[in-house]
Amino acid sequence: MVICFTANFAFSQIKEESENIRRKVQKKTYVGVGGGMGAYQDAKFSNVAYNGISGSFNLGTGRESDHYVWNTDFWTRYSALRTGSHVGKGFYLDAGYSFDYTRKLTENYQLGGKWTLANGNFRRFADLGNNSTGIVLSSTVSALGRYTRPINKDLKINFELALGLFSVAREGTSFAYSAVQKVLEEGVFNFQDEATTSPLHLKYASFETIGSLNKIETTLSLDFRKRWRLTYSWDLFNYRTIKGYPLTIAAHTLSVRFNYINKIKTRTNKK
């Protein structure tokens, strides 16, 4: 009789605690490093494409519940640049910050959006002389889909696809072309107007929509236990066709991520 009473009491207590839980949220904070191949092409500077080996670093945090997932991510990538068409070596440096949010449609599928709040790209190739430096700044909103599937208790595979819907972008250029492409196309160049020469001024930024804008990000990753993630990603950004070629920045990256914080936080109903 005492055993039955004790068992019923314990069961009632567990049930009460379970009913009092509003939701469980998994919290992750991570750091990642990687490498791969980067590429850059802008026909305003040169008629050829440049590429080279790249290295990357990213830092971010995220939350996952039974209904939603959100993440924030800061990344920076350095890529060497060279071409077989002429001598010289260069580089580009890419950095940005993004936020994404998805709702869980089923156990495996998620749908939502991603906002790359700020993305800056700086390119330098000294042997191009007056055309040696290029800057591209952008802020892009994308549709985001995600597929996840556990393989076993230690492994989970993930696939993500983000497709750019619209972007505010602007390029700053070298001495030889000290105005953005939009200014040159519209014929409003004025040496007295600082907005045409300053790479940070937004007056002549372009609002580009899908079609004239191509922003694609794909990611295939494998989670191992609680702490590790191995990722292959490919991303491409281009807009503003010049001499029949769009200004293009792209990279293939293989990276490893370490979740130095990975814990589940239980949120309960207020009594």
Image: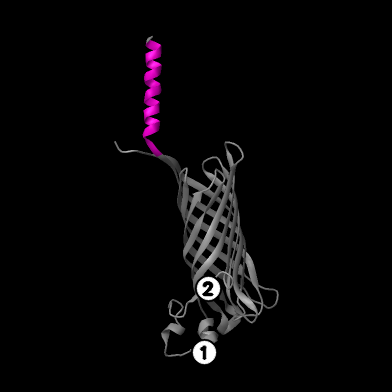
Q: Which residues are magenta?
A: 2-22
- Between 265 and 177, the one lying in front of the other is 265
Q: For the view shown, which residue lies furthest in the right direction?
A: 84
Q: In this figure, which residue is indicated by the disc labeled 1?
A: 187
Residue at left 52%, top 58%?
57
In terms of sequence position, does the residue under pointer 2 or pointer 1 come before the other? 1
Instruction: Estimate the x, y position of residue 1 in percent, counting from the top left.
Output: 38, 9
Answer left or right for 39 relative to 5. Answer: right
Q: Main secondary structure of the magenta part?
A: helix
Q: What distance separates the C-alpha of mark 2 from that of mark 1?
A: 19 Å
Which x, y percent locates residue 50?
Answer: 64, 72
Can you tell which mark lies on residue 208? 2
Q: Is residue 122 above or below residue 129?
A: above
Residue 241 appears in view: yes
Q: Which mark identifies residue 108? A: none
> Which class describes the residues within 10 Å of circle 1: few (<14), some (14-19), or many (20+)?
few
Q: Amino acid at mark 1?
A: Gly
Q: Would you say the residues marked 2 and 1 are in contact, meaning their CB atoms lie under 8 Å apart?
A: no
How crowded pointer 2 is (Cα within 10 Å; few <14, some 14-19, many 20+) is rated as some
Locate residue 74, reporting x and y percent: 47, 59
Q: Residue at x 52, y 70 (%)?
A: 121
Name, please, the residue furthest toward the left: 271
Is 138 in the magenta?
A: no
- Residue type for callout 2: Glu
Mark 1 falls on what kind of element?
A: loop
Q: Quadrant of the C terminus?
A: top left
* Camera-side residue of 80 and 206: 206
Secondary-structure class at tag 2: strand
At x 39%, y 21%, the residue is 10
The single residue placed furthest to the top in the displayed view is 1
